[in-house]
Image (cartoon, rainbow, N blue to C red):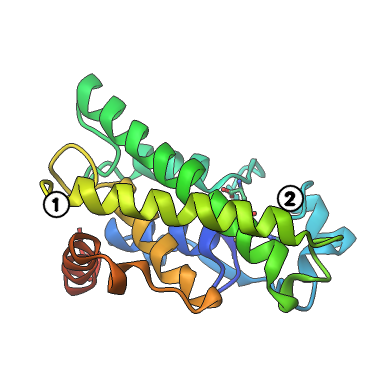
Amino acid sequence: MKLYHSPMAPNPDRVVHFLRAKGKLDAVEIVEVSIMQQEHKTDQYREVSPFAQVPALVLDDGTKLTESRAICTYFEGIFPEPNLMGADPKEKALIEMWDRRVELMFFIQFAGWFRNAHPMMAPLEVPQSPEAAAKSEKAARRMAERFNEHLATHEFVAADRFSIADITLYISCGFCRVMQWAPHRELPHLGRWYGAMKERGFAG
Ligand SMILES: N[C@@H](CCC(=O)N[C@@H](CS)C(=O)NCC(=O)O)C(=O)O
């Protein structure tokens, strides 16, 4: 299997952390794609990922998977231990619910802020919009507060145990550095949880 990866980019990092938590990082051949050098926009890479996005996983039979969560679902299926996406219907639903909240209500909002405000993103986000950046920043900050409130009474993001939802939030909080923001340094319960995740090293 080939995993197309861009180090420091959050969606590919999510997949790599997930695989590391499974102890299976050596199961894939990693192919690096530089987003800043726009290698993901070449015709050659578009054959792998028609939407020109990273990560992408190409299976040995040629099947192409190009959504980070779908790639994680595939790894969960072929490497079932440790379970990271739920062991029974209730856990699966709770973990998916929180993981989607992190991705859609926090990470995507943060990405909207970053893409519309950061000079580095100007070639990729045309045109950048200060209004969109301000709206997304507000939504991301509000959601970080909600996670902080949740983590005041929960050790983990979902289902009282380590899961993909922790990985998605950990990657998202770390990525906030690109806007000189560290929500886990501002918000105490998020900070406690972030420290525990860091210490854990995602060993499963
Ligand atoms: N929904 C996709 C999003 C992938 C995505 O947006 N990846 C970013 C890197 S984190 C990318 O390829 N950006 C390139 C661009 O915007 O041109 C997933 O979860 O894999």
Q: How many marks?
A: 2
Give 150 or 102, whichever is nearer the viewer. Answer: 150
Q: Amino acid at mark 1?
A: Ala
Q: Residue 79 appears at what percent x and percent y?
A: 32, 45
From where the camera sits, is residue 117 visible? yes
Residue 76: x %, y % from top left: 35, 41
In screen coordinates, is 21 left or right of 175? left
Point out the quarter of the image occupied by ligand 1.
Answer: bottom right
Please tell me which residue lies in front, 201 or 64. 201
Residue on which the image places disc 2: 49
Q: Residue at x 59, y 53 (%)?
A: 136
Is label 1 in a helix, a strand or a loop? Answer: loop
In the rendered view, would you say 48 is above or below 191? above
In the picture of the structure, the residue carrying the numbered disc 1 is 152
Q: Secondary structure at mark 2?
A: loop
Q: Is residue 182 above or below residue 3?
A: below
Residue at horizontal 55 percent and vertical 69 percent from the top: 30
- Asked whether mark 2 and ligand 1 are closer than 8 Å, the reply comes as yes
Label 1 close to label 2 by CB (< 8 Å): no
Q: Is residue 201 left or right of residue 137?
A: left
